Amino acid sequence: MSRAAKLTLGAAFCGSALIVWGVHFLQQRERNTMYQGVLRDDERRREKMRQREEDYQRSMQKRELYERVQTVSKPVLEPDSHQ
């Protein structure tokens, strides 16, 4: 085999190896980026649930306060007269 053929084969091999390595590197980086997105989504969901729980607790405190100072009674439902 000639020297030029050996150099061409070696260059093709090295080029192919670099391309394969590059593709795997990019795939790994993309996988990590996607996983970080999942972690951020989970954190946002936890924060939203925590905020909803705080809002609910404030609402219950207000309700208790209002029920202490106001009389609460159930409304009397009248029969439907639109028939």
Image (cartoon, helix red, strand yellow):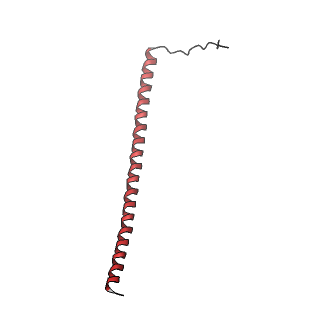
- Where does the N terminus fall, quadrant-wise? bottom left
Q: Position of residue 51 (x, y in %)?
A: 40, 34
Up/down of 4 relative to 17, above or below: below
- Where does the C terminus fall, quadrant-wise? top right
Q: Position of residue 73 (x, y in %)?
A: 53, 15
Examine the image and state in which quarter residue 76 appears: top right
Instruction: Please give the name of the residue rendered at 39% of the width and 39% of the height, measured from the top-left corner.
Output: 47
Up/down of 83 relative to 45, above or below: above
Q: Number of numbered discs present?
A: 0
Up/down of 76 relative to 31, above or below: above
Up/down of 50 relative to 1, above or below: above
Instruction: Please give the name of the residue rendered at 43% of the width and 33% of the height, measured from the top-left corner.
Output: 52
Q: Position of residue 25 (x, y in %)?
A: 36, 63
Q: Position of residue 38 (x, y in %)?
A: 42, 49
Name the one closer to the observer, 27 or 14. Answer: 14
Side (left or right) of 82 relative to 36: right
Examine the image and state in which quarter residue 5 appears: bottom left
Instruction: Please give the name of the residue rendered at 42% of the width and 20% of the height, measured from the top-left corner.
Output: 65
Name the one closer to the observer, 61 or 29. Answer: 29
Instruction: Please give the name of the residue rendered at 36% of the width and 65% of the height, measured from the top-left corner.
Output: 22
Name the one closer to the observer, 6 or 81. Answer: 6
Q: Residue furthest right?
A: 83
